[in-house]
Amino acid sequence: MYMTRTQIYLPGDQLIQLQFLAKKKNTKMSKLIRAFIEHGIENERKKAKKNTFLTDLAGSVTKGPKDVSKNLDKYLYGS
């Protein structure tokens, strides 16, 4: 896998936690950072997929009365 070098700024407490985790897991900080980024990207993909599903579902409703908001009681209670 081709990788591009980049630089980020971290608050001190995040750096300390990363260093601690890297030492505890006997791995490099860069590997941890890549794993955290991948996890975050995957979560965003899942959210986007859920949002697309709901949008598709709402968009698929094409039949029904056009005046539901105006005549809600009529449709709910038949009055």
Image (spheres, rainbow, N blue to C red):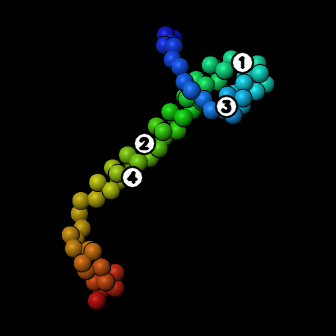
Amino acid carrying mark 1 in the image: Thr
**Residue nearest the observer in this picture, 58 or 3:** 3
Question: Image quarter for residue 19?
Answer: top right
Name the N-terminal-most of marks 1 and 4.
1
Image vertical order of residue 50 relative to residue 35, above or below: below
Question: Image quarter for residue 16?
Answer: top right
Whether residue 75 appears in this view of the structure is no
In this picture, residue 70 sits left or right of residue 5? left
Q: How much space separates mark 4 and mark 3, taking CA atoms? A: 40 Å
Name the N-terminal-most of marks 1 and 3.
3
- Which residue, given by chain and number where applicable, does mark 1 sit on? 27
Amino acid carrying mark 2 in the image: Ala
- Which residue, given by chain and number where applicable, does mark 4 sit on? 54
Q: How much space separates mark 2 and mark 4, taking CA atoms? A: 10 Å
Image vertical order of residue 36 relative to residue 59, above or below: above
In this picture, residue 50 sits left or right of residue 58? right
In this picture, residue 47 sits left or right of residue 54? right
| Residue 76 percent coordinates (x, y) | 34, 81
Q: How much space separates mark 1 and mark 2, taking CA atoms? A: 31 Å
Residue 12 numbered mark, or none: 3
- Which residue, given by chain and number where applicable, does mark 2 sit on? 48
| Residue 18 percent coordinates (x, y) | 69, 27
Q: Secondary structure at mark 4?
A: helix
Name the N-terminal-most of marks 1 and 2.
1
Residues at discs 2 and 3 in contact (Cβ within 8 Å): no
Name the N-terminal-most of marks 4 and 3.
3
Q: How much space separates mark 1 and mark 4, taking CA atoms? A: 40 Å
In percent of the image, x 67 and y 31: which residue is there?
12
Q: How much space separates mark 2 and mark 3, taking CA atoms? A: 32 Å
